[in-house]
Image: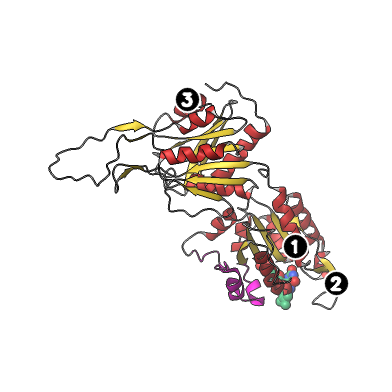
């Protein structure tokens, strides 16, 4: 790999690189550099055997992130669950015969094989071993099992091996592995022809220069949707109210404060989008008058704040829609399904994601959420508590299936 060449093929993509205990483990260092040169962010996971060949420090320095070697070394997060969820593709190179067997059987006795059971994106495996091992019936069978399950198992190359044998077993070249990762990512880009406008977070409605009315929304659900849509190939514009979260890579981010700014910004971008997903918790009311100076408490026993309605963004945008798919959220505290169904109909939505924000787990601020999806065509799909990132993928899958592939509407916009 020419290290001076910087590509963009994997720009914004997040790849997990699993390294196992093959003599070819040192080649994973070059592979890591190549992935980084193509713009990918790489998380490295090593088996214990791999650390006998190359030190984790080498990968740590070159990846810029902590290398996972121990399933039980939890640090601040449960990496065997968070890494597979965050990455767009999982690459194992080199992959030993032992790894192929464990992966085929679903064994999970180390960090790498445990992670593999949670991966939802493409898995690409580049084996490297002695020729006799590669042609052994058990290895052949395990490769077949993995391929039948959709895992991309690359053919090792024929050439001189560490044993002195000339046979098929050499780790295939960097360019072959990069092309396979690239192709696997492209194949799962089911949103590649969509422009997705996502709103997220709360709004802040000023009372005076230092106070505002707001709500408990953290923005996590909307940011997760923006990230998932980008990973599936969409062009994404994220319009976010005040949130401490940083923009997901590869997403165009526009920050706003008030409901009026949110409405204006969404309106400006609505015409160009193909799908609008309104995950923001926009204030329904704002103070009628905003004090120019800080309101003082001296001499006041009480204070009345007069409120007025903000623009109903979904209704406003629905009135201007041409062919856009419009998806809303219903954060409810009671009668979740009936309220969500009313909102779906009243606002002419194609799909609504309803969730009960009173649940102890899930809802505002949490990393997890449970939800029910209702569509204008009468489908209903429920999702138990899961990470917001995973739920984001489920929502996109439902929108794709119910609205983009079979877009018949059951009832008209009211
Ligand atoms: C010097 C040496 C080189 C090895 N090279 C390979 C190899 O290229 N491919 C392979 O499948 N196993 C190879 N092995 C055997 C693996 O390291 C062994 O099966 C180990 O248990 C693999 O563990 P892992 O799959 O958890 O990384 C090698 C072992 C040694 C000692």
Is the CB of mark 3 within 8 Å of ligand 1? Answer: no
Q: Does residue 57 belong to the magenta stretch?
A: yes
Label 2 vs label 3: CA separation?
66 Å
| SS at badge 1 | helix
Q: Which residue is mark 3?
A: 342
Please give the range of residues in magenta: 46-74
Mark toward the start of the polypeptide (2 vs 3): 2
Q: Which residue is mark 1?
A: 177
- Identify the coloring: secondary structure
Which residue is drawn at the image coordinates 75% and 62% (left, top)? Answer: 177
Q: Does residue 281 belong to the magenta stretch?
A: no
Indicate the quadrant where residue 171 lies. Answer: bottom right
Label 3 vs label 1: CA separation?
50 Å
Q: Is residue 12 above or below residue 232?
A: below
* Residue 56 locus on image (x, y percent): 59, 73
Residue 159's label in the rendered image is 2
Mark toward the start of the polypeptide (3 vs 1): 1
* Residue 80 locus on image (x, y percent): 56, 59
| SS at badge 2 | strand
Label 2 vs label 1: CA separation?
17 Å
- The quadrant the N terminus occupies is bottom right
């Amino acid at each position: 790999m020419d290290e001076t060449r910087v590509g963009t093929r994997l720009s914004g993509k997040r790849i997990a690189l699993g390294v196992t205990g093959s003599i070819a483990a040192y080649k994973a260092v070059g592979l890591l550099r190549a992935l980084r040169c193509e713009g990918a962010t790489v998380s490295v996971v090593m088996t214990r055997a791999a650390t006998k060949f190359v030190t984790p420090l080498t990968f740590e320095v070159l990846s810029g992130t902590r290398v996972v070697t121990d399933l039980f070394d939890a640090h601040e997060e449960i990496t065997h669950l968070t890494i597979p969820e965050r990455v767009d593709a999982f690459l194992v190179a080199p992959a030993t015969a032992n790894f192929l067997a464990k992966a085929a059987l679903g064994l999970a006795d180390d960090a790498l094989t445990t992670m593999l059971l949670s991966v939802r994106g493409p898995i690409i495996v580049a084996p490297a071993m002695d020729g006799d091992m590669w042609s052994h019936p058990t290895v052949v069978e395990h490769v077949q099992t993995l391929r039948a399950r959709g895992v991309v198992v690359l053919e090792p190359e024929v050439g001189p091996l560490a044993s002195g044998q000339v046979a098929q077993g050499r780790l295939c070249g960097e360019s072959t592995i990069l092309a396979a990762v690239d192709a696997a990512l492209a194949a799962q880009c089911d949103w590649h022809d969509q422009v997705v406008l996502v709103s997220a977070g709360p709004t802040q409605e000023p009372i005076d220069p230092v106070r505002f009315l707001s709500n408990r929304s953290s923005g996590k659900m909307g940011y997760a949707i923006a990230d998932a849509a980008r990973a599936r190939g969409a062009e994404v514009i994220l319009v976010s109210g005040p949130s401490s979260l940083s923009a997901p890579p590869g997403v165009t981010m526009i920050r706003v404060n008030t409901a009026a700014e949110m409405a204006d910004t969404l309106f400006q971008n609505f015409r160009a989008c193909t799908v609008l997903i309104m995950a923001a918790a926009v204030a329904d009311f704002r103070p009628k008058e905003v004090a120019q100076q800080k309101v003082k408490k001296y001499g006041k026993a009480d204070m009345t704040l007069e409120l007025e309605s903000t623009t109903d963004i979904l209704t406003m945008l629905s009135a201007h829609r041409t062919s856009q798919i419009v998806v809303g959220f219903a954060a409810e505290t009671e009668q979740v399904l009936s309220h969500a169904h009313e909102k779906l109909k009243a606002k002419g939505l194609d799909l609504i994601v309803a969730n009960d924000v009173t649940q102890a787990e899930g809802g505002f601020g949490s990393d997890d959420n449970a939800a029910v999806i209702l569509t204008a065509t009468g489908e209903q799909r429920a999702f138990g508590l899961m990470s917001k990132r995973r739920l984001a993928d489920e929502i996109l899958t439902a929108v794709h299936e119910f609205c983009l592939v079979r877009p018949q509407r059951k009832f008209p916009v009211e």
